Image: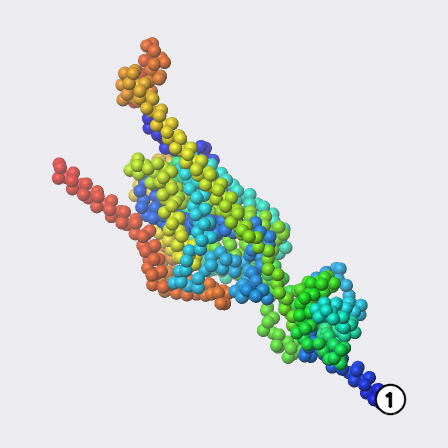
């Protein structure tokens, strides 16, 4: 009887050891990069942190399957290295201490990944579950791409500038067309020769005393 | 009353115009310019026309990057996710996110020249905007161009100064500067280096393009052109050196950043594989740790060895790129790693835009000046319509460069449209002025302009040194083209995530031949036509008499 109890006890102790070992069927490797993530505020990885980890995994399992049977003692950790990496496996006490299938554990962890990360002040990159890929969050995209808005603004400014300049040019052109016509009308009244192209306004202002026409003519002759 | 020729408001505008034109993208990246001979040189117009067709595409790209700089994070900082959101896009993984943004999201480049693809509407929009901006600046002729060049000449300097301060304070900038100032003696003994330097200065100053002549034609006849020539050349060279200090400090930063990223990847790989404590492997003891691990865990190390890259700062610095690669890929990669990258990105691409528009103004001035000078055309159409027509035609043709294979056509134009023909044009100009017009007459003209005769240095340079240099450059390029055999180009391979060399197809070679022929043949053809005309006149006169 005593021997049977001893056998049972040793089996009970051996079973979890067999369940949790590297590359075991339903075990997952976890890797933490605490110093990379936190730098000077990095905490040391000790037994208390391991306890928190077990608690978080149990919490994730409970949330996922919504049955309250998973205990902290069901989560087994082994092969903790200096890197801070270890293997863990979740056992099911209702089924004779066999390991919970990997798919369930994976789904549970995926669902509560963000909570687990936050508990350790880490991110998806610094707290890695090596077989569980995380879905990357897509970048926030506004309904109209930003560049089109800026493009529209610049385009409107440039087009406004062009229209302004063209309209200005047309107005100047019209003014210039009106003025020569008025000058021509005045010249016809004054009856002065237009070959020299002297504007008649200067002639009329001077009156009869100084004939602006001749004064201007002298300048045009080349010096002897 | 006769309408006088429009003039620059003050001599400063002319200097600024020349600086703005000369200090173009050529100082940030080598670029051939186009010039046009004042008074009827068809050759220059043809080269100018080719140039303006494709140059504005660069401004379109600058606009694209500028508009995309108003986002957080910058779109070229991270790779986009693949369809099931488990990782990044495959093409982006193989290459860097900046290269992916350039080749895929900006150009949407096709794997070969033959696969033309469709016009990219985003690029077409940016190109239209670029042409509208150019139109706005040249609309009123010198009147508006004169004011615009104040901005396009001075703003790049402000931005370069800001970048100089930012660049020199970046981590790792010193590595770049050391790299720039250590002469590589083997490279110096290679004649190709000197030839490239000569070509760079030649094209950078924009000689052989009528732009300088066009700008100068708006000067009053009493301008001190000797002083201006010296000023513009000095400023151009100093700007080149200044810009390369900025560029190399940014280079150094980028190379150091990549080197340190590479190192940390290797360290992470080692730590993960051998479960070592964090912080036990650092950059300093990496080589010792590697040796130690190789000795203690040989099989594991051997398994890991192919993934362990040899990180080298020298290799990062040696990845010298020129042309569009430098301006868009390397700089955007450096910018994304700075603090407040949006600010630096906006500044940088705005500067690039100013430089490009400044040079475009020179090009279009070179085309428009003969058009507006010819009485035949100005009597029928107002100035605005002529400028508008030129811009519209160039814009429509430029749509070719917005297609998926557009960048390959761009490279063709960039490499062949102007190089040989420019050398020829400038050679002909120099010989025409010195030997045909006569250097004595030229001296006398200068004497009336500036009040003294040019000294012997100028005369020797014009009459002997320049033609010799140009002829030797010309011969070098010809032999280079002939020796390399079939011409090849770099095509982007999306599956590998890098550039591969391919041969040009037949019709592309024909286009290249046409480009070179069209611009070089104009001069002898023009001479022939003039000769025949004179002959006919002489015969007519003799028959009348």
Q: Residue at x 34, y 22 (%)?
A: A182
Whole-percent x and y of residue B290?
66, 72
At x 58%, y 73%, the residue is: B306
Tell me if residue B357 comes above or below residue B90 in the rendering.
Answer: above
- The residue closer to the viewer here, B30 or A222, is B30
Chain letter belonging to callout 1:
A
Q: In the displayed image of the protein, which residue is found farthest to the right?
A: A2
Task: Tell me if residue A202 comes above or below residue B224 in the rendering.
Answer: above
Coordinates of residue B128 in the picture (x, y in percent): 43, 47
Dividing the image into 4 quarters, which one contains the N terminus of chain B? top left
**Along the viewing direction, whichever of A82 and A140 lies nearer the viewer:** A140
| Count of residue discs | 1
User: Can I make out residue B272 in this image?
Assistant: no
Along the viewing direction, whichever of A80 and A6 lies nearer the viewer: A6
Q: Is residue B463 left or right of residue B530?
A: right
Report the coloring of the rendering.
rainbow
Residue at the spot x=39%, y=33% of the render? A170
Secondary structure type for disc 1: helix
**Residue A207 sits in quarter:** top left
Image position, residue A148 (x, y; %): 51, 49
Q: Position of residue A100 (x, y in %)?
A: 71, 76
Q: Which residue is denoted by mark 1 in the rendering? A: A2
């Amino acid at each position: 009887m005593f021997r049977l109890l001893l056998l049972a006890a040793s089996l009970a102790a051996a079973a979890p050891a067999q369940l949790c070992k590297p590359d075991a069927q339903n075990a997952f490797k976890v890797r933490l990069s605490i110093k990379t993530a936190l730098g000077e505020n990095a905490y040391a990885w000790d037994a208390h942190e391991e306890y928190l980890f077990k608690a978080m995994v149990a919490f994730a399992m409970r949330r996922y399957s919504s049955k309250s049977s998973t205990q902290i003692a069901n989560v087994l950790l082994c092969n903790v290295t200096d890197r801070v990496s270890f293997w863990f496996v979740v056992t099911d006490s209702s089924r004779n201490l066999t390991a919970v299938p990997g798919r369930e554990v994976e789904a549970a962890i995926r669902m509560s990944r963000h909570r687990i990360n936050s508990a350790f002040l880490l991110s998806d990159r610094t707290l890695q579950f090596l077989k569980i890929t995380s879905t990357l969050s897509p970048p926030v995209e506004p309904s109209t791409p930003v560049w089109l808005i800026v493009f529209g603004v610049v385009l409107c400014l440039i087009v406004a500038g062009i229209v302004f300049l063209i309209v200005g040019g047309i107005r100047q052109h019209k003014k210039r067309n009106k003025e020569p016509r008025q000058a021509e009308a005045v010249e016809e009244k004054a009856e002065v020769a237009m070959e020299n192209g002297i504007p008649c306004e200067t002639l009329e202002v001077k009156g009869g005393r100084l004939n602006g026409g001749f004064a201007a003519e002298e300048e045009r002759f080349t010096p002897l | 009353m006769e309408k006088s020729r429009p003039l620059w408001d003050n001599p400063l505008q002319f200097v600024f115009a020349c600086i703005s034109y000369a200090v173009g993208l050529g100082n940030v990246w080598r670029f051939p310019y186009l010039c046009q001979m004042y008074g009827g040189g068809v050759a220059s117009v043809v080269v100018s026309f080719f140039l303006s067709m494709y140059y504005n595409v660069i401004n379109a790209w600058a606009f694209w990057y500028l508009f995309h700089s108003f986002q957080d994070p910058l779109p070229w900082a991270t790779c986009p996710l693949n369809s099931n959101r488990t990782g990044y896009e495959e093409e982006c993984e193989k290459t860097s996110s900046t290269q992916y943004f350039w080749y895929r999201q900006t150009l949407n480049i096709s794997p070969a020249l033959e696969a033309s693809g469709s016009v990219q509407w985003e690029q077409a929009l940016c190109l239209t905007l670029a042409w509208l901006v150019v139109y706005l600046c040249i609309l009123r002729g010198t009147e508006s161009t004169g004011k615009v060049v104040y901005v396009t000449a001075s703003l790049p300097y402000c931005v370069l100064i800001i970048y100089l301060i930012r660049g020199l304070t970046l981590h790792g900038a010193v590595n770049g500067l050391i790299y720039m100032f250590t002469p590589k003696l083997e490279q110096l003994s290679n004649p190709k280096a000197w030839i490239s330097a000569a070509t760079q200065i030649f094209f950078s100053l924009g000689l052989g393009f009528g732009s300088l002549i066009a700008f100068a034609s708006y000067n009053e006849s009493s301008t001190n052109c000797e002083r201006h020539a010296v000023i513009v050349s000095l400023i151009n060279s100093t700007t080149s050196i200044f810009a390369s200090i900025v560029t190399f400090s940014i280079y150094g930063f980028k190379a150091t950043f990549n080197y340190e990223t590479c190192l940390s990847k290797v360290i992470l790989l080692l730590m993960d594989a051998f479960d070592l404590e964090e912080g036990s492997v650092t950059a300093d003891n990496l080589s010792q740790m590697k040796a130690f691990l190789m000795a203690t865990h040989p099989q594991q190390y051997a398994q890991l060895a192919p993934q362990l890259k040899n990180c080298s700062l020298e290799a990062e610095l040696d990845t010298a790129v020129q042309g569009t690669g430098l301006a868009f890929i390397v700089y955007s990669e450096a910018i994304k790693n700075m603090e407040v990258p949006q600010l630096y990105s906006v500044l940088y691409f705005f500067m690039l835009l100013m430089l490009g528009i400044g040079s475009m103004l020179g090009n279009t001035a070179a085309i428009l000046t003969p058009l507006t000078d010819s009485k035949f055309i100005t009597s029928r159409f107002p100035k605005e319509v002529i400028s508008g027509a030129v811009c519209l035609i160039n814009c429509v043709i430029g749509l070719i460069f917005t297609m998926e294979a557009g960048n390959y056509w761009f490279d063709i134009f960039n490499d062949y449209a102007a190089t040989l023909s420019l050398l020829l044009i400038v050679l002909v100009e120099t010989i025409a002025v010195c030997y045909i017009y006569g250097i004595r007459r030229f001296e006398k003209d200068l004497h009336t302009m500036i009040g003294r005769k040019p000294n012997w240095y100028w005369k020797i340079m014009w009459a002997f040194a320049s033609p010799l240099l140009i002829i030797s450059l010309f011969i070098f390029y010809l032999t280079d083209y002939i020796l390399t055999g079939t011409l090849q180009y770099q095509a982007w391979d999306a599956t590998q995530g890098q550039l591969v060399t391919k041969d040009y197809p037949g019709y592309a070679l024909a286009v290249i031949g046409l480009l070179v022929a069209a611009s070089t043949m104009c001069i002898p053809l023009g001479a022939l036509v003039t000769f025949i005309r004179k002959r006919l006149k002489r015969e007519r006169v003799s028959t009348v008499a």
